[in-house]
Amino acid sequence: MTYQYILTDLTDGILTITINRERQLNALNTTLLQEIKAVLTKHQTDASVKGVILTGSGAKAFAAGADIKEFSDFKSAEGSKMAADGHAIMRQLETYPKPTIAAVNGFALGGGCELAMACHLRVASENAKFGQPEVNLGIIPGYGGTQRLVQLIGKAKALELLMTGNMIKAEEAQQLGLVNYVVTQEELLDKCRGIIQKIAKKAPIAIAKVIECVDAYYTDGVDGLAFEVEAFGACFDTEDVKEGTTAFIEKRKPQFQGK
Ligand code: COA
């Protein structure tokens, strides 16, 4: 399948999705977000895909936000629909059963920052800049930024960034816990691939359950510890637990099948 605004590459079990609107600083329009959703859905249960890297084309931007030209004359109903549709895609990334990593290669502003925050991990290049500048436009973040920024960096700093619209550099983003690693532009994709390759050696069902359990912590009305009890128990019905424990006893590396 060909897409208009994204490039996809599946190599060695790693699905790389590149937002491909370089001249518009990879601004996220409706079609582009739907394309990300479509490719994620296509590979969601594909056992050969071990993880997803999301990045932007060029050396300047991951994504400089939602496409301002697309929503400038919206009324409230259209704004709410835009946010709801965006939320569905962010949740798909956040709950994806394989690791998702944002390779942030430049500006991650507004919806771009929100897209990165919906991924499980974030690796930034040294030139990356993060921010939620929506208040400059008379709006607020609508793809989950008011919630996920608080989760990742805490209330005080999140409120500061959300109210001032300030941009922060990669180094500060790492100090705040917004990004996992900062590397050079050249090292960015290799760093992300390395993380996925490491996770790919673990038991896939256990990885999916880790993602579900951590998500449960943030889900209203779900008792995360009780959720963990069930998930832990369910691991014992997999073939992978036999392989993992047997390999340990036999002093060899496990070969997990994801069953
Ligand atoms: N939506 C639509 N178009 C955008 C965009 C966005 N969020 N961000 C950048 N672009 C477009 C610009 O309109 C420009 O297009 P043009 O050449 O057709 O005029 C092109 O990308 C390059 O942007 P430009 O502003 O010229 O680059 P810059 O280096 O001077 O500034 C930024 C970079 C990121 C500081 C600036 O583009 C910006 O502030 N973008 C908007 C950020 C934002 O508010 N995001 C939240 C949106 S909800």
Image: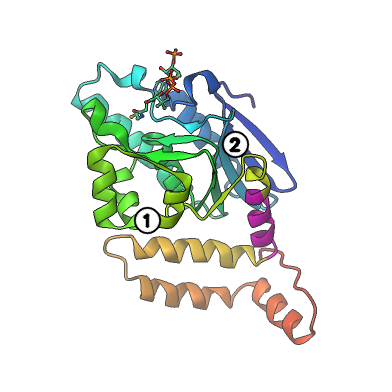
x, y (%) of residue 123?
A: 54, 49
- The numbered mark at residue 1 is none
Decide if ligand 1 comes within 8 Å of the CB at mark 1. Answer: no
In this rendering, the answer to whether 161 lies above or below 120 is above
Q: Earlier in the sequence, mark 1 or mark 2?
A: 2
Q: Secondary structure at mark 2?
A: strand
Query: What is the magenta range?
Result: 191-201
Image quadrant of ligand 1 equals top left
In-image side of 72 versus 241 (left or right): left
Q: Which residue lies at the image location 24% right of the left edge and 39% below the top edge?
A: 164
Q: Which residue lies at the image location 75% right of the left edge and 73% below the top edge?
A: 254
Is 155 in front, or is 160? Answer: 160
Amino acid on which disc 2 is placed:
Ile
- Decide if residue 113 is in sight here: yes
Circle 1 is placed at which residue position?
Answer: 152
In this rendering, the answer to whether 43 lies above or below 151 is above
- The numbered mark at residue 17 is 2
In-image side of 167 versus 72 (left or right): right
In the picture, the quarter occupied by the C terminus is bottom right
Mark 2: few/some/many CA within 10 Å (<14, 14-19, 20+): many
Amino acid on which disc 1 is placed:
Leu
What distance separates the C-alpha of mark 1 from that of mark 2? 23 Å
x, y (%) of residue 205?
A: 59, 64
Q: Secondary structure at mark 1?
A: helix
